[in-house]
Amino acid sequence: MLTIIQDFVKQHLPAKKKTTPSGWTSFNAVCCVHNGETPDTRGRGGLTANQDGSVSYHCFNCNFKTSYQPGRHLTFKFRKFLKWLSVDDSEIKRLVIEAIRVRELVNPEEVKIEQEEKIEFKSRDLPEDRISFNNLNLKNNAKDAHPALEYCYDRKIDLEKYEFYVTKQQQYNLHKRVIVPMIWQGKTIGYTARAIEDNVKPKYHSHYEPNFVFNINNQEKDWKFVIVSEGPFDAMSVDGVAVLNNEVNETQADIIESLGREVIVVADRDRAGSKMLNSAMEYGWSASFPVWQETCKDINEAVVKYGKLFVLKAILDAKETSKLKIELMRKKLYN
């Protein structure tokens, strides 16, 4: 059963191909024309299939890479590869379900979690005179130690799990913001600074590498799903991730899908939320339309009002996996 997807891919390769004794199969790459290159005529596409059921594709012309390993979901890039092999949508959907079934048979410890391509982010410093919440001069009532601390308390953020900073710098009104660090593979790659007063504009001042997915570093290996939102405070409220925008680009999708679990998008109830739902449909992810959206504009507001456990249950109960149903809900709520 572990080789079902691998066998399917091999059956749908172009008729003109060559296989070496080492198991490498070469053929005219199917990706180049879709990536702004001229069609390949020199057999620059290559596929390897391993005994564990995994399969990898690499184009030596446009450098497109994608892979599948039993225990992981079919990534967006792998589904694109299948489509370029002329596999129809119904078959791709069947393989997505098959990958979920296979996942139940595989020991999570045996699954190698990796991005389709190595993704790097450059280190960026936090403000020099920053002070961690842990180093504030806490009084009897801790939330009164600094307005930024009170802001996070009021938004029901777990201050033991998440790290925050403040600064006296007045440039960009940083002294009136709470600084949220961006962490990638143990290193700081920048920060976003959220205004704690309504009259401070813009709401966020950011200094971090593009294409980043906030809170990816706090995702546990054994979690069955990941909740994707727009803003960092929404993500921290339910231990999910945030794309820091109203759309998800391919690099971010690759990072999220490298977790190897179900992806559930929860969009804000504003015009920008419609774009988030478009991303969910594009990448084949689930989307949720929880009941609290009738009274709350985003996840954090709902957690403040109803509590974390209620919000999480509502998200799971209102999850939609059908692209058609997601599109119908998008039109109903956002048009």
Image (cartoon, rainbow, N blue to C red):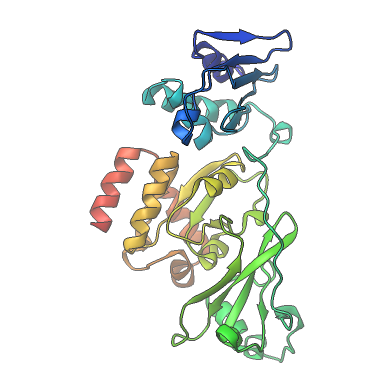
Q: Nearer the viewer, residue 33 or 330?
A: 33
Viewer-proximal residue among 289 and 140 = 289
**Residue in view at x 74 percent, y 80 percent:** 128
> Dividing the image into 4 quarters, which one contains the C terminus?
bottom left
Q: Position of residue 161 (x, y in %)?
A: 68, 66
Question: Where is residue 150, by image quadrant?
Answer: bottom right
Q: Is residue 227 left or right of residue 189?
A: left
Q: Residue at x 56, y 32 (%)?
A: 62
Q: How many marks?
A: 0
Q: Position of residue 315 (x, y in %)?
A: 44, 53
Which of the 4 image quadrants contains residue 5? Answer: top right
Which residue corresponds to the image point at 58% horizontal and 28% vertical from the top-left?
61
Q: Identify which residue is drawn at 75% across, 58% down.
A: 186
Quadrant of residue 232 within the rendered picture: bottom right
Whole-percent x, y for residue 272 in the image: 36, 61
Q: As displayed, is residue 41 above or below residue 181?
A: above
Q: Is residue 320 visible?
A: no
Task: Determine whether, in the image, residue 63 is placed left or right of residue 131.
Answer: left
Position in image of residue 256 (x %, y %): 57, 47
Q: Using the image as rendered, state which of residue 165 and residue 47 is in the foreground.
A: 47
Q: Is residue 258 visible?
A: yes
- In the picture shown, does residue 123 fall above or below 15? below
Location of the N terminus by quadrant is top right
